[in-house]
Image (spheres, rainbow, N blue to C red):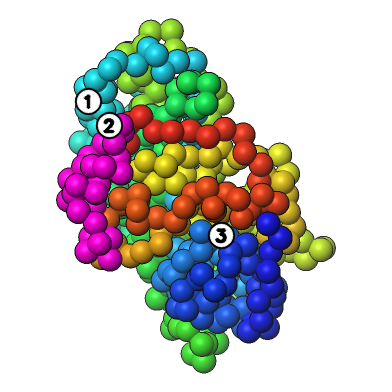
């Protein structure tokens, strides 16, 4: 659908969502960020909803500045997906054992690896570049340096909340692996550290929302943030890469001869340096993926509504972006008050997954309708495949 431009900000706010259906808190956030002097424009995705500081489902293009809260606390959070050569008919009727093996290979929730994953021992992982990557840890903010061992043990782990690991099938009954995770605790600590530093800077004292505090180009604070930010984004990418390799190794053991296509990987909480209309901008995507012309991406729904593999159309009005998923329509607390375990069992019928109180806040009914979200962004992406989950693992 074409976007709607809404008033209320100094910079344009282009919405691929109905403003009347967006909660007032989120609309206030969007107008606040569009009023900042460094903002060139805001693109709002159809999965938009209220978030800390900046709205989830927003793409903010800034010149000579960046707001850490517009990236989010899970720096580099995103998706990876890979098509296998396996047909769904080869899967066992009872998927509980396979789910258990996957959970043993990839720690979930607060769990981590007892010893850090050795890339040399995991088939499919690149063997080079790891020493240089970890050397970068010693250049991060001093406040997080004591977290090195924890960061190493958490690399290749899923986490909790809306993070997931799934085995899916497409319309041709081909099996896929899909996972969603980010930079774990180290990314969270770096984000919180820099958000607090930004709030204390003199130029941020009169903002409409202190959570929108920015770092300015050419300052030591900006240089320090960019250093830590890009390292955390790389950590998130490698985290998903390790998990994907561990999952594929489990599948090789279960299904001899299985092969894997080139993975699709995309961040949806991150910063990128991009140029539009001849201007060099820092583009933050918080709950949005890059959807440049021909670029593949992944847009998930919920525990039972599947995932779309998409190809970007490169729409410059949206800063070459698309939604990162269906987006929540109610808070976690509201979901727990609204739904029962019987509702969870019914809404996830046919999916091998947890059906207990620990994931009730992730019930499909707490999310927006994925089909409506996809229809609202037909000028941003085209659909390549629709995947439906067979196994869904959450922390």
Mark pair 1, 3: CA separation:
35 Å
Q: Residue at x 38, y 8 (%)?
A: 256
What quarter of the picture does the N terminus occupy?
bottom right
Residue beneath label 3, please? 46
Residue 140 or residue 333, whichever sits in front: 333
Q: Residue at x 62, y 78 (%)?
A: 34
Residue 257 or residue 271, whichever sits in front: 257
The extreme top residue here reads 257
**Is 145 included in the stretch rendered in magenta?**
no
Labels 1 and 3 touching (C-beta < 8 A):
no
Dividing the picture into quadrants, the one containing residue 384 is top right
Dividing the picture into quadrants, the one containing residue 38 is bottom right
Q: Residues within 10 Å of mark 2 (few under 14, many from 20)?
A: some
Q: Residues within 10 Å of mark 1 (few under 14, many from 20)?
A: few
- Compared to 252, does 314 lie above or below? below
Span colored in magenta: 334-360
Labels 2 and 3 touching (C-beta < 8 A):
no
Residue beneath label 2, please? 352
Residue 325 image point, x, y percent:
49, 50
Q: Name the disc covering residue 96, or none.
A: 1
Residue 251 image point, x, y percent:
36, 19
- Compared to 339, does 61 lie above or below? below
Residue 273 image point, x, y percent:
66, 58
Labels 1 and 2 touching (C-beta < 8 A):
yes
Query: Which is more N-terminal, label 2 or label 1?
Result: 1
Q: Residue at x 41, y 59 (%)?
A: 328
The residue tagged with tag 3: helix, strand or loop?
strand
Mark pair 1, 2: CA separation:
7 Å
**Is 339 included in the stretch rendered in magenta?**
yes
The residue tagged with tag 1: helix, strand or loop?
helix
The extreme bottom residue here reads 206
Left/right of residue 321 with respect to residue 143 in the rendered view: right
């Amino acid at each position: 659908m074409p976007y709607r431009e809404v008033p209320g900000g100094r910079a344009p706010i282009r919405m691929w969502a109905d403003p009347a259906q967006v909660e007032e808190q989120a609309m206030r956030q969007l107008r606040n960020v569009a009023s900042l002097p460094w903002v060139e424009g805001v693109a709002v995705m159809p999965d938009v909803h209220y978030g800390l500081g900046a709205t989830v489902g927003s793409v903010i293009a800034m010149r000579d500045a960046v707001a850490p809260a517009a990236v989010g606390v899970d720096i580099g959070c995103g998706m990876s997906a890979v098509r296998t050569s396996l047909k769904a008919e080869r899967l066992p009727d009872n998927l509980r054992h396979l789910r258990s093996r996957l959970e043993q290979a990839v720690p979930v929730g607060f769990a981590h690896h007892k010893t850090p994953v050795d890339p040399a021992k995991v088939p499919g992982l690149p063997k080079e570049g790891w020493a240089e990557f970890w050397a970068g840890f010693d250049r991060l903010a001093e406040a997080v340096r004591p977290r090195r061992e924890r960061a190493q043990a958490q690399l290749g782990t899923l986490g909790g909340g809306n993070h997931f690991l799934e085995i899916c099938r497409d319309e041709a009954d081909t099996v896929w692996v899909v996972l969603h995770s980010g930079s774990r605790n180290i990314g969270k600590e770096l984000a919180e550290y820099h958000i607090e530093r930004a709030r204390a800077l003199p130029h941020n004292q009169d903002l409409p929302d202190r959570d929108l505090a920015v770092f300015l180009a050419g300052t030591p604070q900006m240089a320090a943030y960019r250093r830590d930010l890009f390292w955390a984004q790389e950590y998130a990418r490698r985290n998903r890469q390790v998990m994907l390799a561990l999952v594929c190794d489990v599948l090789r053991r279960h299904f001899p001869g299985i092969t894997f296509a080139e993975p699709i990987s995309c961040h949806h909480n991150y910063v990128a340096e991009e140029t539009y209309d001849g201007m060099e901008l820092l583009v933050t995507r918080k709950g949005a993926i890059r959807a440049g012309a021909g670029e593949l991406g992944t847009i998930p729904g919920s525990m039972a509504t599947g995932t779309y593999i998409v190809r970007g159309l490169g729409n410059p009005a949206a800063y070459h972006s698309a939604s990162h998923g269906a987006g929540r329509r109610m808070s976690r607390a509201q979901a727990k008050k609204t739904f029962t375990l019987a509702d969870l069992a019914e809404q996830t019928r046919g999916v091998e997954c947890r059906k207990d109180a620990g994931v009730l806040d992730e019930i499909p009914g707490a999310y927006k309708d994925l089909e409506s979200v996809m229809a609202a962004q037909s000028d941003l992406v085209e659909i390549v495949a629709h995947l439906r989950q067979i196994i869904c693992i959450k922390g």
